[in-house]
Image (cartoon, grey):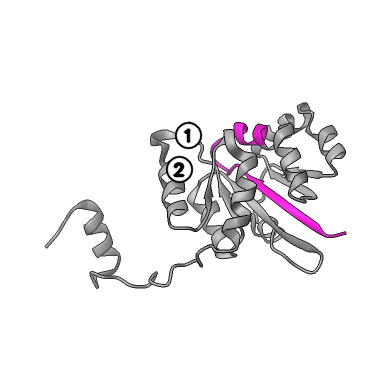
Amino acid sequence: MTRKVCFVTIGATAAFDQLLEAVLAPQFLQALQGSGYTTLSLQYGKNGQKILRDSEASELAKRHGIEITGFDFNKQGLGQEMWAVKAGEDREEGVVISHAGSGSILAALRIEAPLIVIPNTSLLHNHQLELAEEMARLGYLVHGSLEDLPATLTEADILSKKRQAWPPENHGADPSGRGLVGVMDEEMGFYD
């Protein structure tokens, strides 16, 4: 049987229980089944095991033919879990669903995994939203919300066929010729 994995990460530093609840909701599990997913793998943080245990998701997942696995934190990083969504001999290309933290976004982009980001809007200054919007505008990922999570699976499938390569072709160019100092000066508003 061919596997198709949806890997969800909520991050390591700030709780994002709302994302876990959204991916364990009946509507999302039904959308996974409808898109041919066989596995839902969760990096659920410190509260997630209780959320998973208390939800009806395990029973619903069995009905939908989806295996749910999870863990709180992996000191080795999330590379193995992210690689599991990539197409291979025994699996179709799946998707990574992540909070919009820069580390998780970059990890998924480096291996060219299809990526949906859901900003944790409860964080200070809502910085995840800005990053998600800009990266989606540039064509690297799908920016979704907790309310429209099932629809983002289709968007990610469409984007995976035309997404931009990471890093961008001009990633090494430094227009100022001054390296990090030039970037910092520009960010701080120091001009010659």
Rendered view: 1 above or below 71: below
Residue type pointed to by label 2: Gln
Question: Image point 44% across, 41% down: which residue?
Answer: 129
Name the residue nearer the viewer: 11 or 163: 163
- Point out the tag, 2 or 1, that comes first from the N-terminus: 1
Work out which residue is located at the far top of the displayed protein and give it: 54
Say if mark 2 contacts mark 1, CB within 8 Å.
yes
Residue visible at 54% across and 61% down in the picture: 109
Residue at the outermost left position: 192
* Mark 1 residue type: Thr
Q: Is residue 94 magenta?
A: no
Going by the image, does 39 lie left or right of 164? right
| Mark drawn on residue 96 | none
Reading the image, the residue beneath label 1 is: 121
Q: Secondary structure at mark 2?
A: helix
Judged from the image, the secondary structure of the residue bearing numbered disc 1 is loop
Look at 41% across and 41% down and name the residue there: 127
The magenta stretch spans residue 18: yes
Q: Is residue 63 left or right of residue 129?
A: right
Q: Give the left or right position of residue 184, taking residue 44 as reference.
A: left
Q: Which x, y percent locates residue 114?
A: 61, 57
Cα separation between marks 2 and 1: 7 Å
Find the magenta span and give its range. 1-22
Q: Nearer the viewer, residue 70 or 151?
A: 151
Residue at (87% x, 37% y) in the render: 63
Based on the displayed image, in which of its 4 quarters is residue 112 positioned? bottom right
> Is 31 situated left or right of 132 in this image?
right
Residue 19 is drawn in which quadrant? Answer: top right
Q: Which percent across, then down, holds residue 168?
A: 44, 68
Residue of label 2: 128
- Quadrant into which the C terminus falls: bottom left
